[in-house]
Image (cartoon, rainbow, N blue to C red):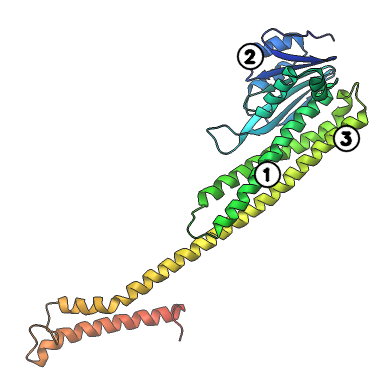
Protein backbone atom coordinates (compact mmCIF):
# COMPACT_ATOMS: atom_id res chain seq x y z
CA UNK A 1 0.00 0.00 0.00
CA UNK A 2 1.38 3.41 -0.93
CA UNK A 3 1.09 5.78 2.04
CA UNK A 4 1.48 9.56 1.79
CA UNK A 5 4.82 11.16 2.59
CA UNK A 6 3.13 13.71 4.85
CA UNK A 7 -0.20 13.68 6.71
CA UNK A 8 -1.62 17.10 7.41
CA UNK A 9 -1.73 17.86 11.14
CA UNK A 10 0.50 14.92 12.10
CA UNK A 11 4.24 14.55 12.53
CA UNK A 12 5.77 12.01 10.17
CA UNK A 13 9.20 10.88 8.99
CA UNK A 14 9.93 8.78 5.92
CA UNK A 15 13.14 6.85 5.43
CA UNK A 16 13.39 4.78 2.28
CA UNK A 17 10.08 2.87 2.11
CA UNK A 18 9.32 3.22 5.83
CA UNK A 19 6.91 5.80 7.27
CA UNK A 20 6.93 6.72 10.95
CA UNK A 21 3.84 8.56 12.24
CA UNK A 22 4.43 10.10 15.67
CA UNK A 23 1.48 11.25 17.80
CA UNK A 24 1.59 12.64 21.34
CA UNK A 25 -1.52 13.02 23.51
CA UNK A 26 -3.95 11.68 20.91
CA UNK A 27 -7.38 13.15 20.28
CA UNK A 28 -10.26 11.50 18.50
CA UNK A 29 -9.93 13.90 15.56
CA UNK A 30 -6.27 13.02 15.01
CA UNK A 31 -6.94 9.30 15.32
CA UNK A 32 -9.72 9.61 12.75
CA UNK A 33 -7.25 11.34 10.42
CA UNK A 34 -4.92 8.35 10.81
CA UNK A 35 -7.75 5.84 10.34
CA UNK A 36 -8.54 7.39 6.95
CA UNK A 37 -5.01 6.61 5.74
CA UNK A 38 -4.31 3.34 7.58
CA UNK A 39 -6.37 0.20 8.34
CA UNK A 40 -6.96 0.87 12.03
CA UNK A 41 -9.76 -0.83 13.91
CA UNK A 42 -12.16 1.39 15.85
CA UNK A 43 -11.67 -0.61 19.05
CA UNK A 44 -7.93 0.00 18.87
CA UNK A 45 -8.60 3.72 18.52
CA UNK A 46 -10.56 3.60 21.77
CA UNK A 47 -7.65 1.80 23.42
CA UNK A 48 -5.31 4.58 22.32
CA UNK A 49 -7.57 7.23 23.81
CA UNK A 50 -7.69 5.41 27.13
CA UNK A 51 -4.76 5.92 29.50
CA UNK A 52 -5.19 2.77 31.58
CA UNK A 53 -5.12 -0.13 29.13
CA UNK A 54 -3.21 -3.25 30.08
CA UNK A 55 -0.27 -4.23 27.85
CA UNK A 56 -1.40 -6.48 25.00
CA UNK A 57 -0.92 -7.52 21.37
CA UNK A 58 -3.72 -7.67 18.78
CA UNK A 59 -2.76 -9.32 15.50
CA UNK A 60 -4.50 -8.61 12.18
CA UNK A 61 -3.86 -9.74 8.63
CA UNK A 62 -2.03 -6.59 7.58
CA UNK A 63 -0.77 -5.11 10.86
CA UNK A 64 -0.15 -5.66 14.56
CA UNK A 65 -1.42 -3.47 17.39
CA UNK A 66 0.70 -3.32 20.57
CA UNK A 67 0.15 -1.54 23.88
CA UNK A 68 3.05 -1.14 26.28
CA UNK A 69 3.66 0.87 29.42
CA UNK A 70 6.82 2.72 30.36
CA UNK A 71 7.76 4.79 33.39
CA UNK A 72 7.79 8.55 33.25
CA UNK A 73 8.89 11.00 35.93
CA UNK A 74 7.56 14.53 35.75
CA UNK A 75 9.12 17.51 37.51
CA UNK A 76 6.26 17.65 40.00
CA UNK A 77 6.47 13.95 40.81
CA UNK A 78 9.52 12.27 42.30
CA UNK A 79 8.29 8.73 41.79
CA UNK A 80 7.72 7.27 38.30
CA UNK A 81 4.20 6.76 36.97
CA UNK A 82 2.79 4.88 33.99
CA UNK A 83 2.74 6.25 30.48
CA UNK A 84 0.95 4.26 27.79
CA UNK A 85 2.63 3.72 24.43
CA UNK A 86 0.70 2.20 21.50
CA UNK A 87 2.04 0.92 18.18
CA UNK A 88 0.40 0.13 14.87
CA UNK A 89 2.99 -1.85 12.93
CA UNK A 90 2.38 -2.68 9.29
CA UNK A 91 4.44 -3.83 6.34
CA UNK A 92 6.01 -0.43 5.63
CA UNK A 93 4.80 1.88 8.40
CA UNK A 94 4.92 2.31 12.15
CA UNK A 95 2.54 4.53 14.08
CA UNK A 96 3.53 5.38 17.66
CA UNK A 97 0.91 6.95 19.92
CA UNK A 98 1.85 8.07 23.41
CA UNK A 99 0.06 9.90 26.18
CA UNK A 100 3.10 12.13 26.48
CA UNK A 101 5.95 12.54 28.99
CA UNK A 102 8.12 9.88 27.31
CA UNK A 103 11.13 12.12 26.80
CA UNK A 104 13.43 9.39 25.38
CA UNK A 105 10.89 8.65 22.63
CA UNK A 106 10.31 12.31 21.73
CA UNK A 107 14.09 12.87 21.70
CA UNK A 108 14.53 9.91 19.34
CA UNK A 109 11.87 11.28 16.99
CA UNK A 110 13.48 14.74 16.94
CA UNK A 111 16.88 13.20 16.28
CA UNK A 112 15.48 11.30 13.30
CA UNK A 113 13.61 14.30 11.97
CA UNK A 114 16.38 16.85 12.36
CA UNK A 115 19.33 14.56 11.60
CA UNK A 116 20.86 13.88 8.22
CA UNK A 117 20.21 10.82 6.09
CA UNK A 118 22.91 8.72 7.76
CA UNK A 119 21.56 9.44 11.27
CA UNK A 120 17.99 8.76 10.20
CA UNK A 121 18.94 5.60 8.34
CA UNK A 122 20.93 4.34 11.33
CA UNK A 123 17.97 4.80 13.69
CA UNK A 124 15.05 3.89 11.44
CA UNK A 125 16.51 1.50 8.89
CA UNK A 126 14.19 0.37 6.12
CA UNK A 127 11.73 -1.82 8.01
CA UNK A 128 9.25 -1.26 10.85
CA UNK A 129 10.99 -4.03 12.82
CA UNK A 130 14.27 -2.13 12.84
CA UNK A 131 12.52 1.09 13.88
CA UNK A 132 10.60 -0.75 16.60
CA UNK A 133 13.90 -2.10 17.89
CA UNK A 134 15.38 1.41 18.02
CA UNK A 135 12.38 2.74 19.95
CA UNK A 136 12.26 -0.13 22.44
CA UNK A 137 16.02 -0.13 22.86
CA UNK A 138 15.94 3.59 23.73
CA UNK A 139 13.12 3.14 26.24
CA UNK A 140 14.72 0.07 27.85
CA UNK A 141 18.01 1.98 28.15
CA UNK A 142 16.04 4.61 30.05
CA UNK A 143 14.84 1.83 32.35
CA UNK A 144 18.46 0.91 32.98
CA UNK A 145 19.23 4.53 33.91
CA UNK A 146 16.32 4.54 36.37
CA UNK A 147 17.61 1.28 37.80
CA UNK A 148 21.06 2.81 38.36
CA UNK A 149 19.43 5.70 40.26
CA UNK A 150 17.47 3.23 42.40
CA UNK A 151 20.62 1.28 43.26
CA UNK A 152 22.32 4.57 44.17
CA UNK A 153 19.42 5.46 46.46
CA UNK A 154 19.64 2.01 48.06
CA UNK A 155 23.31 2.61 48.85
CA UNK A 156 22.50 5.99 50.42
CA UNK A 157 19.65 4.54 52.47
CA UNK A 158 21.89 1.72 53.71
CA UNK A 159 24.05 4.30 55.47
CA UNK A 160 21.01 6.17 56.79
CA UNK A 161 19.35 3.06 58.21
CA UNK A 162 22.16 2.60 60.75
CA UNK A 163 22.34 6.30 61.63
CA UNK A 164 20.24 7.05 64.72
CA UNK A 165 20.19 10.76 63.93
CA UNK A 166 18.49 10.33 60.52
CA UNK A 167 14.79 9.53 60.09
CA UNK A 168 14.40 7.69 56.78
CA UNK A 169 11.00 5.98 57.02
CA UNK A 170 9.61 8.31 54.32
CA UNK A 171 12.60 7.73 52.00
CA UNK A 172 12.21 3.96 52.44
CA UNK A 173 8.50 4.13 51.60
CA UNK A 174 9.03 6.30 48.50
CA UNK A 175 11.81 4.06 47.18
CA UNK A 176 9.74 0.97 47.88
CA UNK A 177 6.87 2.45 45.86
CA UNK A 178 9.25 3.34 43.04
CA UNK A 179 10.61 -0.22 42.86
CA UNK A 180 7.09 -1.67 42.93
CA UNK A 181 5.97 0.66 40.12
CA UNK A 182 8.89 -0.32 37.89
CA UNK A 183 8.27 -4.04 38.52
CA UNK A 184 4.63 -3.61 37.49
CA UNK A 185 5.88 -2.09 34.23
CA UNK A 186 8.72 -4.51 33.47
CA UNK A 187 6.86 -7.78 34.15
CA UNK A 188 4.27 -7.39 31.33
CA UNK A 189 6.90 -5.74 29.12
CA UNK A 190 9.02 -8.88 29.31
CA UNK A 191 6.03 -11.06 28.36
CA UNK A 192 5.07 -8.87 25.39
CA UNK A 193 8.66 -8.68 24.15
CA UNK A 194 9.02 -12.46 24.20
CA UNK A 195 5.84 -12.73 22.12
CA UNK A 196 7.05 -10.13 19.62
CA UNK A 197 10.43 -11.82 19.27
CA UNK A 198 9.01 -15.31 18.81
CA UNK A 199 5.95 -14.55 16.63
CA UNK A 200 6.09 -11.11 15.01
CA UNK A 201 9.69 -10.30 14.07
CA UNK A 202 9.31 -12.15 10.77
CA UNK A 203 6.45 -9.86 9.79
CA UNK A 204 8.54 -6.74 10.45
CA UNK A 205 11.83 -7.87 8.94
CA UNK A 206 11.41 -7.20 5.25
CA UNK A 207 14.65 -5.80 3.92
CA UNK A 208 16.58 -6.93 6.99
CA UNK A 209 18.13 -10.31 7.64
CA UNK A 210 15.73 -12.11 9.96
CA UNK A 211 18.49 -13.60 12.07
CA UNK A 212 20.06 -10.20 12.75
CA UNK A 213 16.75 -8.62 13.72
CA UNK A 214 15.97 -11.45 16.12
CA UNK A 215 19.40 -10.95 17.66
CA UNK A 216 18.56 -7.27 18.18
CA UNK A 217 15.32 -8.11 19.95
CA UNK A 218 17.03 -10.83 22.00
CA UNK A 219 19.45 -8.17 23.20
CA UNK A 220 16.52 -6.03 24.38
CA UNK A 221 15.00 -9.07 26.10
CA UNK A 222 18.30 -9.69 27.85
CA UNK A 223 18.36 -6.10 29.12
CA UNK A 224 14.77 -6.39 30.34
CA UNK A 225 15.60 -9.62 32.18
CA UNK A 226 18.56 -7.94 33.87
CA UNK A 227 16.38 -5.00 34.88
CA UNK A 228 13.78 -7.36 36.32
CA UNK A 229 16.39 -9.37 38.22
CA UNK A 230 17.89 -6.19 39.65
CA UNK A 231 14.43 -4.93 40.64
CA UNK A 232 13.69 -8.22 42.41
CA UNK A 233 16.97 -7.94 44.31
CA UNK A 234 16.24 -4.30 45.11
CA UNK A 235 12.77 -5.26 46.36
CA UNK A 236 14.28 -7.84 48.72
CA UNK A 237 16.93 -5.34 49.85
CA UNK A 238 14.42 -2.57 50.59
CA UNK A 239 12.31 -5.02 52.58
CA UNK A 240 15.41 -5.95 54.63
CA UNK A 241 16.19 -2.26 55.18
CA UNK A 242 12.58 -1.63 56.21
CA UNK A 243 12.65 -4.47 58.76
CA UNK A 244 16.06 -3.32 60.01
CA UNK A 245 14.82 0.25 60.37
CA UNK A 246 11.78 -0.98 62.33
CA UNK A 247 13.96 -3.08 64.64
CA UNK A 248 16.43 -0.26 65.24
CA UNK A 249 13.60 2.20 65.90
CA UNK A 250 12.01 -0.28 68.31
CA UNK A 251 15.33 -0.72 70.08
CA UNK A 252 15.76 3.05 70.27
CA UNK A 253 12.23 3.43 71.65
CA UNK A 254 12.87 0.70 74.21
CA UNK A 255 16.03 2.46 75.37
CA UNK A 256 14.14 5.71 75.80
CA UNK A 257 11.34 3.96 77.68
CA UNK A 258 13.89 2.16 79.87
CA UNK A 259 15.57 5.46 80.74
CA UNK A 260 12.24 7.10 81.54
CA UNK A 261 11.18 4.07 83.63
CA UNK A 262 14.41 4.19 85.64
CA UNK A 263 14.01 7.95 86.12
CA UNK A 264 10.41 7.49 87.28
CA UNK A 265 11.40 4.60 89.60
CA UNK A 266 14.11 6.69 91.22
CA UNK A 267 11.57 9.40 91.94
CA UNK A 268 9.08 7.03 93.64
CA UNK A 269 10.62 7.10 97.18
CA UNK A 270 10.66 10.88 97.43
CA UNK A 271 7.16 10.99 95.94
CA UNK A 272 5.86 8.53 98.55
CA UNK A 273 7.58 10.41 101.38
CA UNK A 274 6.19 13.71 100.15
CA UNK A 275 2.72 12.19 99.91
CA UNK A 276 2.79 11.08 103.52
CA UNK A 277 3.96 14.45 104.75
CA UNK A 278 1.26 16.10 102.70
CA UNK A 279 -1.50 14.20 104.54
CA UNK A 280 -3.42 15.70 107.46
CA UNK A 281 -2.13 13.08 109.92
CA UNK A 282 0.49 12.92 112.62
CA UNK A 283 3.88 11.82 111.29
CA UNK A 284 7.16 11.58 113.19
CA UNK A 285 9.34 14.55 112.38
CA UNK A 286 6.47 16.74 111.28
CA UNK A 287 5.76 20.23 112.61
CA UNK A 288 3.11 18.93 115.01
CA UNK A 289 4.39 15.61 116.38
CA UNK A 290 1.96 13.32 118.19
CA UNK A 291 1.80 13.20 121.96
CA UNK A 292 0.11 9.79 122.27
CA UNK A 293 0.46 6.45 120.55
CA UNK A 294 -3.15 6.72 119.36
CA UNK A 295 -2.17 9.74 117.30
CA UNK A 296 -0.11 7.44 115.03
CA UNK A 297 -2.98 5.00 114.30
CA UNK A 298 -3.89 6.70 110.91
CA UNK A 299 -0.25 6.49 109.81
CA UNK A 300 -0.14 2.81 110.78
CA UNK A 301 -3.35 2.00 108.86
CA UNK A 302 -2.16 3.81 105.71
CA UNK A 303 1.22 2.06 105.88
CA UNK A 304 -0.45 -1.35 106.24
CA UNK A 305 -2.78 -0.70 103.31
CA UNK A 306 0.15 0.39 101.15
CA UNK A 307 2.24 -2.63 102.15
CA UNK A 308 -0.63 -5.07 101.46
CA UNK A 309 -1.29 -3.48 98.06
CA UNK A 310 2.41 -3.66 97.17
CA UNK A 311 2.56 -7.30 98.31
CA UNK A 312 -0.44 -8.24 96.15
CA UNK A 313 1.11 -6.60 93.09
CA UNK A 314 4.47 -8.33 93.66
CA UNK A 315 2.71 -11.69 94.01
CA UNK A 316 0.67 -11.11 90.82
CA UNK A 317 3.73 -9.96 88.81
CA UNK A 318 5.70 -13.04 89.93
CA UNK A 319 2.77 -15.26 88.92
CA UNK A 320 2.86 -13.68 85.45
CA UNK A 321 6.60 -14.25 85.27
CA UNK A 322 7.46 -10.56 85.19
CA UNK A 323 9.56 -10.89 88.37
CA UNK A 324 11.97 -13.79 88.84
CA UNK A 325 12.43 -15.58 92.14
Residue beneath disc 2: 28
> Which quadrant holds residue 105?
top right
Give the quadrant of the N terminus.
top right
Residue 215, numbered label: 3
Mark 1 sits on what residue? 148
Q: In which quarter of the image is residue 49?
A: top right
Mark nearer the viewer, 1 or 3: 1
Horizontal side of 249 relative to 69 (left or right) equals left
Q: Which of marks 2 and 3 is in front?
A: 3
Is 131 on the left-hand or right-hand side of 31?
A: right
Circle 3 packing at 10 Å, graded few (<14), some (14-19), many (20+), is few
Which structural element holds mark 2?
helix
Residue 27, above or below 162: above
- Distance from Cα at disc 1 to Cα at disc 3: 25 Å
Dot 1 or dot 3: first in sequence order is 1
**Contact between labelled residues 2 and 1, with CB atoms less than 8 Å apart:** no
CA gap, disc 1 and disc 2: 38 Å
Amino acid sequence: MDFPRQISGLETIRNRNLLWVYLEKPTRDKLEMISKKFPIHELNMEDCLSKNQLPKIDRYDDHVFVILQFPTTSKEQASPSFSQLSFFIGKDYLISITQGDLLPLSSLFRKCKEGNYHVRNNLMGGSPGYLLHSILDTLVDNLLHMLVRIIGKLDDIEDEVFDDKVANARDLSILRREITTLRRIVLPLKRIMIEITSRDVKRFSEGVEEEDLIDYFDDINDHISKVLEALDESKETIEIYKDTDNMLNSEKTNKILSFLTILFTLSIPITVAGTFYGMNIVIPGSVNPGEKIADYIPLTIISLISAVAAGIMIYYFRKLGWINS
